[in-house]
Image (cartoon, coloured by chain):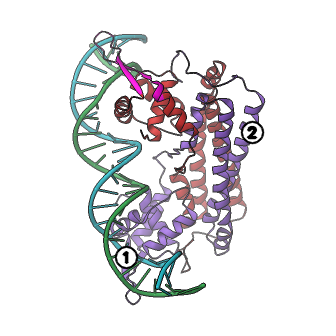
Chain colours: A red, B purple, C cyan, D green
Amino acid sequence: VKGTPSSYLVLGMLRLGARSGYAIKKATDISMRFFWPTSLAQVYPELSRLEDDGLVTRHDDSHGARTRSAYEVTADGEAALLEWLRSSEEAPSRFRDEGVLRLYFADALPLDEQLQLVRRLRRRIVDSEAELQEILPLGDALAEAGTRFPGIVARFGVDAFAFVQDWLDQLEAELEEGPTPPSAQPPPAAGPPP
Amino acid sequence: VKGTPSSYLVLGMLRLGARSGYAIKKATDISMRFFWPTSLAQVYPELSRLEDDGLVTRHDDSHGARTRSAYEVTADGEAALLEWLRSSEEAPSRFRDEGVLRLYFADALPLDEQLQLVRRLRRRIVDSEAELQEILPLGDALAEAGTRFPGIVARFGVDAFAFVQDWLDQLEAELEEGPTPPSAQPPPAAGPPP
DNA sequence: TGAGCCATGTAAACGGTTACATGATTCC
DNA sequence: GGAATCATGTAACCGTTTACATGGCTCA
């Protein structure tokens, strides 16, 4: 019984108390959006697969005319989650960030636009940090109930975004200080790639 | 003429002096692997698309029997790259990290295995930092030729990985200090999702 | 002479997102 | 009455990865 990280996201969210597919998606939007976003179109088929594999059980939980399925993690499911948590990660983290990609090629811009770019990247980070900050209380509440790691991850996100902010502030200052090139950077005549 | 971030990766690498598809892939492996990895199966079709759109020109650069195509960025290509660099980023950065996902659900493990997980994540970061550290001199060399940002991005990577290391060190210390729960954490009886 | 790098491509599979389709319940 | 939320799914598309296929050149 294999599984992608998304399988374990669903499994783990069920274990933490989410019952429906909709609830899994909602919980993910709140707390894991930045590190492992998902969509309903992914959650529902994943739940079916997990059921087929015997890692979760489904029972009907309709209220009146509104249909709803309630899922529970089985013993096999719990075992699979633990095995995954214990396994050494092979898949290296894909950090893909378009902002960094832009930064890498920023020599093509004149200095003032380089600064604009850095500021734009910073603003994006500030916004994300603010969004994450809002969920810190939820983490604290969970921690008092004995579930510590959701809060830890939220703290990590806030601290990491703050770090990037500081770093970009420093970069901005450096760029303002020592404008080595006088203006826009023409493509380098030749020379081996970076 | 639209374009994905990968289009601009190819365009940008050409502009920085890479000439063949192979060279673009090699340059990316060295300096952008952590932030925007790519594969040859992506580079070659992308070059064809860019040529069709008139953003690059291709001319034959075979040596004897070994075939090679050399590409150059056109004026349109340069303009497209600049437009992209100037545009406000809509696509939010996907930070997807399986390590953080694991951490989020680590309450399922007993304390000693939580610590093992944190140490494992840290080791992965140390390795990545070491790899990035090696390319810092390349960035410095480029900077002296007037191309500063590849070096800046390398420094960012090193600093960011160092930050995560320190953060995980602190987390490890915290977990060792105050083991709030005595042993493994059973699934919470009930309660709304996080 | 063989390992390793240079060099180019195609095909299939995969994971994920977006769009589509439908309808109930709740709260203002 | 209408907006927002709860709730479930499917179909099509897209970007990316992995595997496949081929061959020349270089250096130990």
| Residue B170: mark | 2
Q: Nearer the viewer, residue A79 or B48?
A: A79
Looking at the image, residue B3 lies above or below residue A193: above
Q: Which quadrant holds residue A82?
A: top right
Q: Quadrant of the C terminus of chain B?
A: top right
The percent coordinates of residue D4 (x first, y second) are: 40, 22
* Identity of the residue drawn at 49% across and 45% down: B92
Magenta residues span A56-77
Which quarter of the picture shows residue A190? bottom right
In the image, what residue occupies the spot 60% across and 34% down? A130
Q: Is residue B7 magenta?
A: no
Residue A138 seen from this side: yes
Q: Nearer the viewer, residue B35 or C12?
A: C12
Q: Is residue B166 above or below residue A189?
A: above
Helix, strand or loop for disc 1? strand
Q: How dense is the environment of label 2, judged by Cα within 10 Å: few (below 14), some, or many (20 and up)?
A: few
Residue situated in front as seen by the camera: B81 or B65: B65
x and y percent of residue B81 in the render? Answer: 46, 64
Chain letter for the residue marked with disc 1 in the picture: B
Q: Is residue B113 above or below residue B161?
A: above
Image: A44 above or below B145: above
| Three-letter amino acid code of the residue under disc 1 | Thr
Q: Nearer the viewer, residue B52 or B23?
A: B23
Label 1 belongs to which residue? B57
B81 on left or right of A64: right
Mark 1 closeness class: few <14, some 14–19, many ≥20 residues within 10 Å: some
Residue at the outermost bottom position: B64
In the rendering, at what x and y percent does residue D10 appear?
Answer: 24, 34
What residue sits 69% from the left and 37% below the top?
Answer: B115
